[in-house]
Image (cartoon, rainbow, N blue to C red):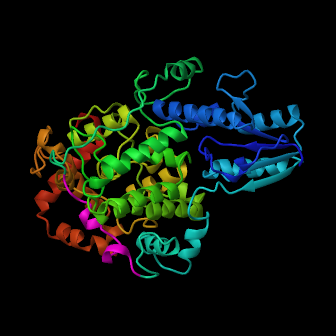
């Protein structure tokens, strides 16, 4: 074998990859902490710390297993802070004759590496990451010739194809495919929620490194109490904890929000999965094994909701990304151009739901899907914020945000900027939905029951203003039909009050 350089990116920490099944003295692995990756967007400090720590742990484990690894810390004197520059340097220094890499999950890195391979006069090869259930183009192939890409049909096909929760080739366990209607309970203090799994690591050294290298970050961190899993062993502990402590009530309360509980029964496995320290298959298999052993305690609706998020939604969103990029990143179907309010970076707002969801994001680098979709995302869409700015915030603030999953969820599902590729209607609501799913409204400065006046919930005004301003765009959307009819019947003075107050909110959101 020619002397080969193999690249491992920060989200390719898959210890089970076939690359590592045998040691070869002619293979050198390369990993690097680079400003190219810390600076393309302003990331949450916990996100940068978690990636660096996970990469270091992965590199150490490879070396312990006898593999040759070149690892550049952020402040390594050899580090060029750019992927291509670093690769060229190592190729020269190590007399490399061949270059291999795992297919990146981000379009920008995919392009950078393809261009690099065309430029160099070496034998090059790209391989699969061996992580996902699907290949990049599988979703596009599945929906070929169809008018709409409905995730539910893709999810059912995946269940059949991989024989997951199936009685036979056609019948799903429990007699139905989807238990979504069972997954919408409001948590009111019972059942008791176990404390989340916390590893309490001291990460002062990496924080000091980021400060020394002038890496600009957002969010907050407790240097002596870092709770995210950053090794495969820790990730497996989190998975075990989810199965034993949280799965039993996961489905019931997966959409719930509460001022006293940040995580409820959520697994907090997304970072472990998106860095590939754990695979979706081993997470689903482990969870299902536990469920089958405890069917007398755990209802099928709890586990199906979890499986759907991973087997259905996650794979579907990745497929949309590779089907629609790079044009997808520029889509702005509603023509929204407003600025993202400053309070997204501070959490300082009188709206209790926004304050809790944003401060949690800044404190934990995490918020669950309903906080992202129906609180922060809902407000950004109702105030018609430029989707570029919304993308940048979501990509930066969340520990699990890598563009392939963030972009489709934000620009598509949350902001409807793709005009309906991902979602068949915009996910907007007045304050009533937030009140239905949380206790946020109880202690809010505003009143969710008030539709007009200074004390009215801003979501109530913004909702009707949004429908009014976009009525031409939604007039043929069947799923919006009922709301558009209510808009037409609304008292003109009431509608004008909604529009007038919405304009005040949009003009000066940080006053609310």
Residue 63, given in percent of the width and then of the height, sits at: 70, 34
Q: Nearer the viewer, residue 328 or 4?
A: 4
Tell me the magenta residue range. Answer: 171-186
Q: Where 365 falls versus 490 (above or below)?
A: above
Left or right: 167, with 180 as reference point: right
- Answer whether residue 175 is magenta in the image: yes
Q: Taking the image as drawn, is residue 157 in sight? A: yes
Residue 508, given in percent of the width and then of the height, sits at: 28, 38
Name the magenta segment's main secondary structure: loop
Q: Where 304 falls versus 15 (above or below)?
A: below
- Answer whether residue 125 is magenta in the image: no
Q: Nearer the viewer, residue 394 or 312?
A: 312
Q: Nearer the viewer, residue 43 or 48?
A: 48
At horizontal 57% and vertical 20% (from top left) the residue drawn is 209
Question: Which corner quadrant of the image does residue 52 belong to?
Answer: top right
At horizontal 79% and vertical 54% (from top left) the residue drawn is 125
Left or right: 201, with 426 as reference point: right
Q: Nearer the viewer, residue 280 or 236?
A: 236
Residue 201, given in percent of the width and then of the height, sits at: 45, 26
Q: Where 101 falls versus 53 (above or below)?
A: below
Left or right: 110, with 378 as reference point: right
Instruction: Give the position of the C terminus as an image quadrant.
Output: top left
């Amino acid at each position: 074998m020619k002397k080969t350089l193999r690249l491992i990116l920060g989200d390719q920490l898959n210890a089970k990859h076939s690359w590592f099944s045998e040691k070869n003295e002619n293979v050198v692995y390369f990993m690097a902490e680079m400003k190219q990756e810390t600076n393309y967007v302003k990331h949450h400090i916990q996100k940068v710390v978690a990636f660096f720590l996970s990469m270091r742990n992965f590199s150490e484990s490879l070396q312990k297993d006898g593999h040759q690894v070149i690892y550049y810390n952020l402040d390594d004197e050899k580090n060029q802070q750019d992927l291509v520059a670093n690769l060229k340097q190592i190729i020269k220094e190590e007399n490399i004759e061949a270059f291999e890499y795992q297919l990146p999950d981000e379009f920008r890195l995919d392009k950078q590496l393809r261009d690099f391979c065309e430029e160099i006069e070496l034998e090059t090869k790209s391989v699969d990451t061996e992580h996902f259930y699907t290949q990049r183009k599988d979703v596009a192939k599945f929906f070929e010739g169809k008018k709409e890409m409905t995730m539910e049909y893709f999810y059912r096909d995946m269940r059949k194809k991989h024989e997951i929760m199936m009685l036979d080739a056609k019948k799903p366990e429990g007699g139905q495919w989807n238990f979504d209607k069972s997954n919408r309970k409001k948590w009111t203090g019972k059942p008791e929620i176990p404390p989340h799994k916390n590893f309490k690591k001291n990460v002062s050294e990496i924080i000091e490194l980021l400060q020394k290298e002038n890496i600009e970050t957002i969010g907050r961190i407790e240097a002596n109490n870092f709770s995210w899993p950053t090794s495969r062993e820790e990730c497996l502990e989190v998975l075990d904890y989810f199965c034993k402590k949280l799965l039993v009530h996961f489905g019931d309360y997966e959409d719930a929000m509460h001022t006293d509980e940040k995580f409820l029964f959520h697994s907090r496995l997304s970072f472990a999965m998106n860095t590939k320290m754990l695979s979706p298959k081993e997470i689903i298999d482990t969870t299902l094994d536990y469920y089958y052993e405890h069917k007398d305690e755990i209802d099928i609706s709890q586990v199906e909701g979890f499986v759907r998020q991973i087997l259905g939604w996650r794979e579907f969103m990745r497929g949309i990304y590779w089907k629609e990029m790079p044009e997808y990143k520029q889509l702005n179907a509603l023509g929204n151009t407003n600025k993202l309010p400053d309070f997204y970076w501070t959490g300082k707002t009188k709206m209790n739901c926004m304050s809790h969801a944003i401060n949690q994001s800044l404190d934990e680098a995490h918020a669950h899907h309903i906080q992202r979709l129906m609180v922060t995302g809902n407000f950004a869409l109702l105030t018609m914020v430029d989707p570029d700015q919304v993308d940048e915030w979501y990509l930066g603030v969340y520990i699990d945000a890598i563009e392939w999953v963030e972009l489709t969820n934000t620009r598509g599902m949350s902001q409807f900027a793709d005009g309906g590729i991902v979602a068949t209607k915009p996910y907007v609501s007045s304050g009533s939905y937030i009140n239905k799913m949380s206790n946020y409204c109880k202690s809010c400065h505003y009143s969710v029951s008030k539709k007009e006046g200074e004390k009215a919930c801003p979501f109530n005004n913004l909702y009707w203003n949004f429908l009014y301003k976009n009525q031409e765009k939604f007039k043929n959307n069947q799923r919006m039909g009922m709301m558009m009819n209510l808009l037409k019947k609304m008292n003109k003075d009431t509608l004008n009050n909604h529009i007038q107050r919405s304009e005040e909110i949009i003009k000066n959101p940080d006053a609310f």
